[in-house]
Amino acid sequence: MTETVQHWCDGKAFAGATTATAPVTNPATGAVSTLVALASVEDAKYVIDAAAGAFSEWRDTSVAKRTQILFAFRELLNARKSELAEIITREHGKVLSDALGEVTRGQEVVEFACGIPHLLKGGFTENASTNVDIYSIRQPLGPVAIISPFNFPAMVPMWFFPIAIAAGNTVVLKPSEKDPSAAMWMAQLWADAGLPAGVFNVLQGDKVAVDELLRNPMIKSVSFVGSTPIARYVYATGTAAGKRVQALGGAKNHAIVLPDADLDLTADAMVNAGFGSAGERCMAISVCVAVGPIADDLVAKIAARTRTIKTGDGTGGADMGPLVTKAHRDKVASYVDAGEADGATIVIDGRTVEADGGADGFWLGPTLIDHVDPDMSVYTDEIFGPVLAVVRVESYDEAMDLVNANAYGNGTAIFTNDGGAARRFQNEIEVGMVGINVPIPVPMAYYSFGGWKNSLFGDTHAHGTEGVHFFTRGKTVTSRWLDPSHGGIELGFPQNA
Ligand code: NAD
């Protein structure tokens, strides 16, 4: 009998009252590896109640004690991260080295959150007025929700929960139903690290679970990462219910290649950023904008490198794994069909790939499409697969206009050896994360991660100091102690003296 991945509530696995489940597949074989529980509203309420019940004790736990638990979690994660990587590869499909990289990037946020005593420090002004002091403190919000996408089942939750927990909040994580096991593994790790029951909880499910998190008054904030239509919905619904919401959405990331760029290094970068994790990264490069006469050379160099990529089971020696589900694989392939029908040139066709993996795996090889026009669906839509489109333009201005006109604004990069051109790019480009000769400019944990335009709804980016602010609210205290100089009746507005 196939097992069911359960919820995690109050420090242990929790089956929930409903029997509704969804299948989880191994993308490299196509076989159902497990089922995942789909929470009912009652199940969701039960888990939220556990998070609410644990809050008052956790927020009053000393910063020193909270930090010790963070350090213990970090040590366990570092020692056992290969276990987590294997789970990710089994359910997501990305190759093991990439899964390990994802865990390491998540771990960096845990390490950042270990510095929470410093990050939570407020200000203090002695004698703001005569014998009156004023100081600021930051306090946790309460139970907070994290809703994560399939493509980073460990890293994206770790963008949020280390800081949320370190700051004194309790957490309900709703992972993607496509790869739910990583969250359960991390929940057990928290328990092993000594986190009190109820501080970190996992609610498995779909829209039913999400809607309860968005509407339940006990949940104080929502951190969402996923596609733009759902991000928009989550932001509108959560804020209407009075919650603090950060909703990170989809992407269409462009790399501009200027004529003076080193074309060999640039071609390496295009292949790595276009096809790593089979293009299922929100920071993947999906459009290469070739400026001027270099286009033929650049496409030839990218094509030569693309031909060397081995597609196959992520547990073997492949460079690139399968797509996450059959439905997603077929959707991505349909964009290649559409590009071909619209007149773009298919330079390398991933639809005919011979993968080193199961016959029923969700395979699509790296695909390079040249002469793409901005009105083709292969350009306009987020594809989220191993499809790199090349758009040819005449000038740098034309390239910048293309990027700035795009509805998304997550990441972008420029390849050039011209410092002035690069500086203009960082100044004028309307995108949240910018790379200069760096194709995937994911900020370190102590900076904040987030896009502009349709790539993020809300005004706070993930992790870094913005993350600390998101998971805390400020309070200022004005204080004086018995002092005769403060006596007497005075109905005027208080002024400093
Ligand atoms: P998705 O939007 O389908 O799902 C994200 C989460 O929302 C999941 O937990 C899912 O269960 C839930 N969900 C799905 N449909 C819902 C509905 N109708 N109502 C309420 N909740 C719903 O996204 P995905 O396919 O899992 O992930 C890929 C997407 O995530 C891509 O668009 C990618 O660009 C985006 N992404 C963005 C970032 C970023 O930082 N901006 C990072 C990673 C992924």
Image (cartoon, grey):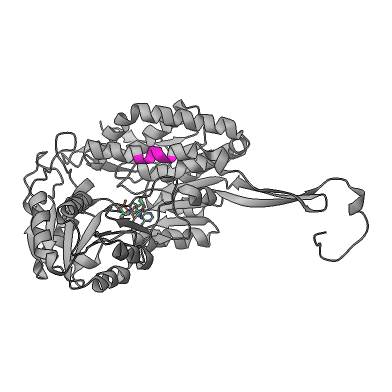
Left/right of residue 154 with respect to residue 296 in the rendered view: right
Say if 56 sits above or below 371 in the image. above
User: Residue 108 colored magenta?
Assistant: yes
Q: Kindly identify the residue that appears in the image at 47 percent across and 50 percent down.
A: 213
Q: Is residue 112 shown to the viewer in this render? A: yes
- Image quadrant where residue 57 sits: top right
Left or right of 153: which side holds 44?
right
Q: What span is in magenta?
A: 105-109
- Which residue is rendered at x = 48% and y = 60% of the image? 459
Provide residue 364's location: percent of width, then percent of height.
13, 50
The quarter of the picture where the C terminus appears is: bottom right
Task: Report which quarter residue 249 is drawn in.
Answer: bottom left
Q: Nearer the viewer, residue 214 or 111?
A: 111
Within the image, what quadrant is residue 260 found in? bottom left
Front in this rendered view, residue 497 or 75: 497
* 460 on left or right of 442: right
Q: How many marks?
A: 0
Q: Residue shown at 53%/33% (left/top)?
A: 67
Q: Is residue 17 visible?
A: no
41 in the magenta segment:
no
Q: Residue at x 14, y 39 (%)?
A: 318
Q: Nearer the viewer, residue 256 or 316?
A: 256
Q: Main secondary structure of the magenta part?
A: helix
Q: Quadrant of the N terminus?
A: top left
> Is residue 125 positioned above or below 37 on the image?
below
Residue 196 coordinates in the image, percent (x, y): 53, 30
Residue 366 location (% of width, % of height): 13, 51
